[in-house]
Amino acid sequence: MLIKQKPSWYMPEHLATPEDVYFNRRQILGAMGIGAAAGVGIVPSLASAAIEGFPAPRNAKYTLDRAITDEEEATTYTNFYEFGSSKNIWRWAKRLKTDPWEVVIDGMVEEDITIQADALIRKLGDQEERLYRHRCVEAWAMAVPWTGVPLANLVKFAKPTAGAKYMQFETFLNPDIAPGQRASWSPWPYTEGLTIEEASSTLPLLATGLYGKAMPNQNGAPIRLVVPWKYGFKCIKSIVRITFTDKQPVSYWQELQGREYGFWANVNPDVPHPRWSQATERLLGTGERVPTQLYNGYAEECAHLYANMPQDRTLFF
Ligand SMILES: Nc1nc2c(c(=O)[nH]1)N[C@H]1C(S)=C(S)[C@@H](COP(=O)(O)O)O[C@H]1N2
Ligand SMILES: [Mo]
């Protein structure tokens, strides 16, 4: 059944209905056995272990222009719609079992790979910590120490074939533990995409940790993307599949609302969202408002990726 009604979370946070309204309703339906969808579980596998290596050495190249966000703020104010539409879903996300965690790499690659997350990370080289700004399209921002490995290392490891141009990333699908995924109007699982060229550049991380510890479930354990010059929705959490392709992937948000959320989604203060301005951002923790920067302040390391493309608004939504 396709419900044509506009969900509350299409709105920017300051317009959204009080937290949990939608989510609690779903919980009640769930408890009554209504609205449960047939789910594909995470395939268990025996040879597994948690990702180790925290804290990892900090890469001194990446510095901030603002204070690091308070850890409690960054780990309790989170967007993870699989667990509900409020920012306060961290308790619910504890239900996610992240060990074992199988990851599939497929599509236009020399050979499909199925591997446990911890084994994958060990194959991708030394983990490091980087301080990055994060800018959500809803105009809140944080600055946090991520742990991870360069996504470029995964591209090399995957050995894409000659015609491959894009990567599609996919989050787990399991409505039994993630009540948000019982919403039939929503195109689960969450997916995102990058060009291979973007993924191979210096900044993107396949992140495994936050604040020098293993990634909290609510922040996308065990592995998620971090792409700091793009709006936060590109930073897909709890990845189970990475597919190389020659076609530009259509993301979860594009499918839901393609006029508002595009493929490129590069941060630009001068290109407003159709329903709100992107000129400034609110810092988690302090509530301070600061100007938003082009490419979230990372132009030097990413603008070259777009030099030969039309410099119009499609690059920035
Ligand atoms: N699978 C999945 N990934 C996701 C999301 C989500 O709802 N589901 N939300 C995105 C959005 S909108 C943002 S801003 C960031 C938030 O990351 P954080 O909660 O760790 O701050 O995760 C992104 N990744
Ligand atoms: Mo976001």
Image (cartoon, rainbow, N blue to C red):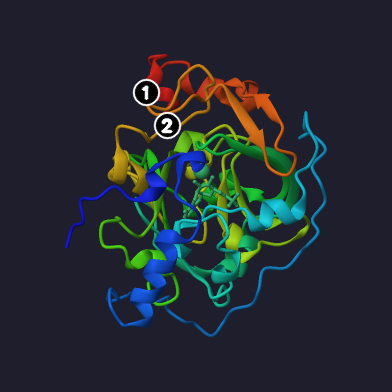
Which numbered marker is on residue 6?
none
Please say if the residues under marks 1 and 2 sit with CB atoms less than 8 Å apart. Answer: yes
Residue 246 visible here: no
Q: Secondary structure at mark 1?
A: helix
Q: CA distance from mark 1 to mark 2?
A: 7 Å
Mark 1 within 8 Å of ligand 2, using the beta carbon = no
Q: Is residue 163 left or right of residue 102?
A: left
**Residue type, label 1:** Thr
Where residue 301 sits, quadrant-wise, is top right
- Image location (x, y in percent) of residue 274: 37, 26
> Dot 1: within a 10 Å radius of its alpha carbon, few (fewer than 14), some, or many (20 or more) residues?
some
Which numbered marker is on residue 264?
2
Q: Quadrant of the N terminus?
A: bottom left
Q: Secondary structure at mark 2?
A: loop
- Image location (x, y in percent) of residue 106: 38, 58
Where residue 311 sits, quadrant-wise, is top left
Residue at 39% in and 62% down: 112
**Which residue in the structure is indicated by mark 1?**
314
Where residue 99 sits, quadrant-wise, is bottom right
Counting residues from the N terminus, which is met first, the one under dot 1 or under dot 2?
A: 2
User: Quick one: which residue is furthest to the left in this view?
Assistant: 1
240 versus 17 height, above or below: below
> Dot 2: within a 10 Å radius of its alpha carbon, few (fewer than 14), some, or many (20 or more) residues?
some
246 versus 224 height, above or below: above
Residue 178 visible here: yes
Mark 2 within 8 Å of ligand 2, using the beta carbon = no
251 versus 30 height, above or below: above
Q: Is residue 67 left or right of residue 39?
A: right
**Residue type, label 2:** Trp
